[in-house]
């Protein structure tokens, strides 16, 4: 009897310890790295074979079904991820006139629920009801989206709706899809942002105030999805309208060089 009295509490302690370990939340550190740091993990199935994409949106600014379906098609065409799940989270408005990337990051910290866990890699996309603080409407420069971590991006949905409203040819879902695919290309490490270019000369360049030329993480091939102007409203709309007028697909596509880069880093 003494053995049983000693054994049962010990066994109960083991069970308690086991349950406590199983209930621990996943670590968030793997989702707080620099842009492009998870490019290979997204492209290949080496570390993760499932993607969980959390679509967090301010009420009234949910993306269209067509845009999300187009994003899923893009992911499956360029990565080896066959298991892609979308989780929708409706949020209240932060009531800001504009948003800095720091503020977007703080909103993510407060509201994100999906993080890497086991064989699942999680990505967070925030659809905002306020424009970027860097917009310059006097110069017709408005930002449609941005990536700011290895598994995080923001889509300025209010700006997209206003931009699409200026066109009789291009729809909201098409502008959403082009923006999502462009920014997701950056999460995949394009251009030279975690995925090394096979032929570096296809990266676009910029000249700084000291007349020093350097890459700007965008493609220099005409019509490519990763052209720098696709992150800005007027330029993207102009390209998409031009495509439509020529009878081409409205949505810009990756050029051969960008696809070659992705293949070199574990993608299709």
Image (cartoon, rainbow, N blue to C red):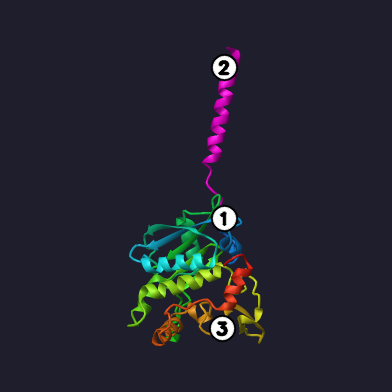
Q: Is residue 132 visible?
A: no
Residue bounds of the magenta highlight = 1-29
Label located before the other in sequence (1 or 2): 2
- The picture places residue 218, in percent across and down from the top left corner, at 57, 78
Q: In the image, residue 192 lies at what x, y percent? A: 62, 73
- Tell me the distance, in whole angstroms, between the alpha carbons under discs 2 and 3: 76 Å
For disc 1, the marked residue is 48
Residue 167 location, quadrant: bottom left
Instruction: Check disc 2 and report the residue beneath it.
Output: 5
Pointers 2 and 3 in contact (C-beta within 8 Å): no
Q: Name the residue under label 3.
A: 221
Left or right, 185 with reference to 127: right
Q: Which residue is drawn at 55% across and 30% down?
A: 15
Tell me the quadrant of the picture where the N terminus can be found: top right
Residue at mark 3 to residue at mark 1: CA–CA distance: 31 Å
In the image, residue 167 sits, relative to residue 124, either above or below, namely: below
Q: In which quadrant is the C terminus drawn?
A: bottom right
N-terminal label among 2 and 3: 2
Question: Which residue is found at the position 45% from the left and 74% from the top?
Answer: 178
Q: How far apart are marks 1 and 2 (CA)?
A: 45 Å
Position of 85 compared to 31: left or right? Answer: left
User: Pointer 1: residues within 10 angstroms few (<14), some, or many (20+)?
Assistant: some
| First reached walking from the N terminus: tag 3 or tag 1 | 1
Q: What element carries label 1?
A: loop
């Amino acid at each position: 009897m003494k053995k049983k009295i000693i054994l049962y509490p010990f066994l109960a302690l083991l069970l308690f310890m086991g349950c406590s370990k199983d209930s621990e939340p996943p670590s968030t550190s793997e989702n707080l790295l620099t842009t492009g740091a998870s490019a290979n993990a997204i492209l290949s199935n080496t570390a993760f074979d499932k993607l969980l994409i959390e679509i967090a949106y301010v009420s009234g600014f949910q993306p269209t079904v067509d845009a999300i379906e187009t994003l899923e098609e893009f992911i499956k065409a360029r990565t080896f991820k066959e298991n892609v799940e979308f989780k929708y989270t409706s949020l209240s408005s932060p009531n800001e006139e504009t948003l800095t990337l720091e503020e977007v990051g703080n909103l993510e910290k407060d509201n994100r629920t999906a993080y890497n866990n086991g064989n699942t890699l999680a990505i967070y996309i925030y659809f905002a009801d306020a424009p970027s603080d860097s917009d310059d409407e006097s110069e017709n420069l408005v930002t449609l989206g941005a990536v700011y971590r290895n598994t995080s991006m923001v889509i300025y949905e209010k700006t997209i709706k206003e931009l699409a409203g200026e066109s009789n040819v291009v729809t909201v879902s098409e502008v959403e899809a082009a923006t999502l695919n462009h920014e997701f290309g950056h999460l995949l490490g394009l251009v030279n942002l975690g995925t090394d270019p096979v032929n570096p000369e296809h990266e676009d360049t910029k000249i700084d105030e000291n007349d020093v030329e350097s890459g700007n993480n965008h493609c220099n091939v005409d019509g490519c999805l990763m052209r720098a102007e696709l992150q800005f409203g007027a330029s993207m709309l102009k390209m998409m309208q031009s495509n439509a007028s020529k009878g081409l697909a409205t949505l810009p596509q990756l050029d051969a060089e960008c696809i070659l880069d992705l293949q070199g880093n574990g993608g299709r």
